[in-house]
Amino acid sequence: MARLPRLSFPGCAHHVIQRGNNRDDCFYDEADYKAYLTFLKESSTKYQVAIHAFVLMSNHVHLLVTPSDEQGLSRMMQALGRKYVQYFNHTHGRTGTLWEGRYKSTLVDAATYLLTVYRYIELNPVRAKMVLHASEYPWSSYQYNALEKPIKLITPHPLYLKLGKTSDERLGAYRTLFRGRMAEQELTAIRDATNKAWVLGNPRFKAKMEAATGRRAAPLGRGGDRKSTKYLETTR
């Protein structure tokens, strides 16, 4: 089956994943993490892509971003990937590719999923059993979003800012979101949408994105599937 083209829509939040080739490590030491964040800041500024959340795992990266134009995200990722691979290969005496093909991404319905994706990204080290709490992992935006440690890379999303009228209120409200585990249904929805290039959102948002982009936002219901959208519409 041919891969679907990535969806990109200006002003809409996107969840992005890029993995190391063959799931190999793409960060060896602290200097690598710092270099990646420096290149990310440079490329996101150049191509006007707001970075709301991130986590740098040993062999992959998650980003929550909002591009200002249709080409901004792809141009940012190309520039970032090129600079980091050159740095990484030179520093560690290696050659060849570093990333597992093209990055994967999905459009995110901010009204229903934005803060869920924030949590999904910043809880990655906890799910991987690398730390017991998101606050213990140094290479994620939790350090800024929950603890207010300076990270010039971050641009708060408007919905994040609405968590409180003051900084203390926002930080407290944000930390509250991280109590307990994420529901398995939420994890599956985010993973499926991102890995399969579908849209992460409610039916109204998906219909809006389909109309705006001219591309399907969700898989077609299979014939006879009584849970499919098409079947349910015929029974109303």
Image (cartoon, grey):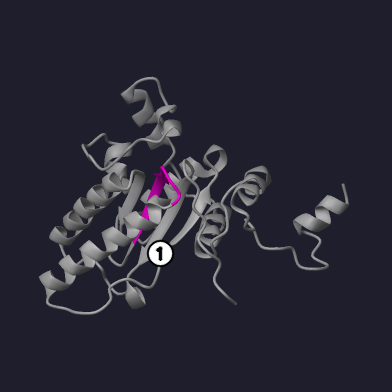
Specify the segment rendered in magenta: 61-70
In this rendering, does residue 182 appear at all?
yes
Residue type pointed to by label 1: Tyr
Q: Is residue 229 left or right of residue 209?
A: right
The x and y percentages for residue 109 are: 55, 44
Q: Is residue 146 above or below residue 33?
A: above
Q: Is residue 128 above or below residue 207?
A: below
Figure check: 170 above or below 138: above
Q: Image point 33% across, 54% down: which residue?
A: 76
The location of residue 169, given as percent across then percent down, is 37, 24
What residue sits right under mark 1 in the picture? 103
| In-front residue for pair 211/35 | 211
Disc 1, SS: loop
At 41% from the left edge and 53% from the top edge, which residue is drawn? 71
Residue 173 position within the rendered picture, expressed as x and y whole percent measured from the top left: 41, 30
Find residue 3 and report its image quarter: bottom right
Residue at point 27%, 36% (across, down) = 147
Please indicate, yes or no, whether residue 123 appears anywhere in the rendered image: no
Specify the quadrant of the image occupied by residue 189: bottom right
